[in-house]
Image (tube, helix red, strand yellow):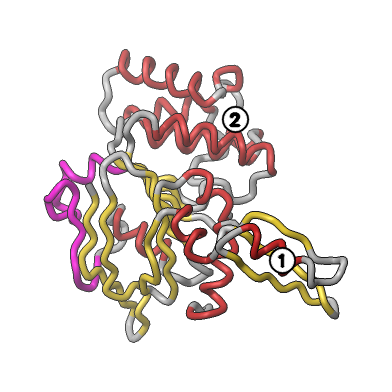
Amino acid sequence: MIEIKDLTKKFGDFTAVDRLNLTIETGEFFGLLGPNGAGKTTTISMLSTVLLPTSGEIRIDGKVLDRRASSEKKKISVVTQEYSMRQDMTINEVMEYQGRLYYLPKDVRKKKADELLEFAGLTEYRRRVVRHLSGGMKRKLMICRALMTEPEILLLDEPTAGMDALARRQMWNLLRQLQSRNLTILLTTHFIDEAQTLCNRVALMNKGKMDVIDTPDSLIKQLGPYAVDETAKDTLSSRYFADRNSAVEYLSTCNESAALRNTTLEDVFLSRMGRNITSR
């Protein structure tokens, strides 16, 4: 379990994360959403101990996490936004280096690398250098590398950034399989459909503050599970309804460009942004 209590990070007079409180259960797939500058990556950086909090604390299974808490740090692996691998290494060399970095015995390194590359569908490319991999392959390799130490918590900061639609779906399938291993996953993403598909719960934050935490289904239900989109004077507007009959009744009064559809988590995000979330 991850417990975040009054977590705050300041850079001079600028407050990047402002008294954040959050609990993520063991085995939960949790999404952290927000506009650019919301404080998501700063939060991930504090969870990985790259940054230290200005105040507040993080607890892992009841124990305070800091740079000296080696047993708690070993439970965590991070996949960052940037490709943090040497471009002249092969996949085999990346996995071997990661194993050596954590003092894994040779037979364990080989066994884990074989299993993880097979799991990610990278076995046939294992002798290819990183610079010749597609963006999707690089992301998969970063996840394989992060799993070499058998972490209990996986922090994913924009793991599908730059991927095409097919590669994103392949990554989703990979992440679903990881969740079945009772791995606790914290995901930040700008793809709201990704969070709706993968996450048990999501949190919306902005300007370092928490706005709301709930399941995607519950947030959609609160807004209204049925949406009517209408275009007027080159402007698209949406209205949300608690039941289909009300949505259909309203649709009958609209112009021919109007359409009925199911509400998505992206609608929730945009609705709350317009109401009480502002970009930095």
Picture coordinates of residue 174, whole percent (x, y): 51, 32
Picture coordinates of residue 191, whole percent (x, y): 58, 54
- Identify the element where label 1 is drawn: helix
> In the image, 6: left or right of 234?
left
User: Mark 2 packing: few (<14 Cα in 10 Å), some, or many (20+)?
Assistant: some
Marking on residue 129:
2
Q: Which residue lies at the image location 79% right of the left edge and 76% below the top edge?
A: 235
Disc 1 marks a residue whose amino acid type is Glu
Q: Which residues are magenta?
A: 53-76
Q: Residue furthest bottom?
A: 13
Image quadrant of residue 23? bottom left
Q: Residue furthest right?
A: 256
Picture coordinates of residue 5, whole percent (x, y): 20, 65
Marking on residue 249:
1
Q: Nearer the viewer, mark 2 or mark 1?
A: 1
Of the image marks 2 and 1, the number of the one nearer the N terminus:
2
Residue contact at pointers 2 and 1, CB within 8 angstroms: no
> In the image, 221: left or right of 186?
right
Determine if the magenta segment contains residue 272. Answer: no
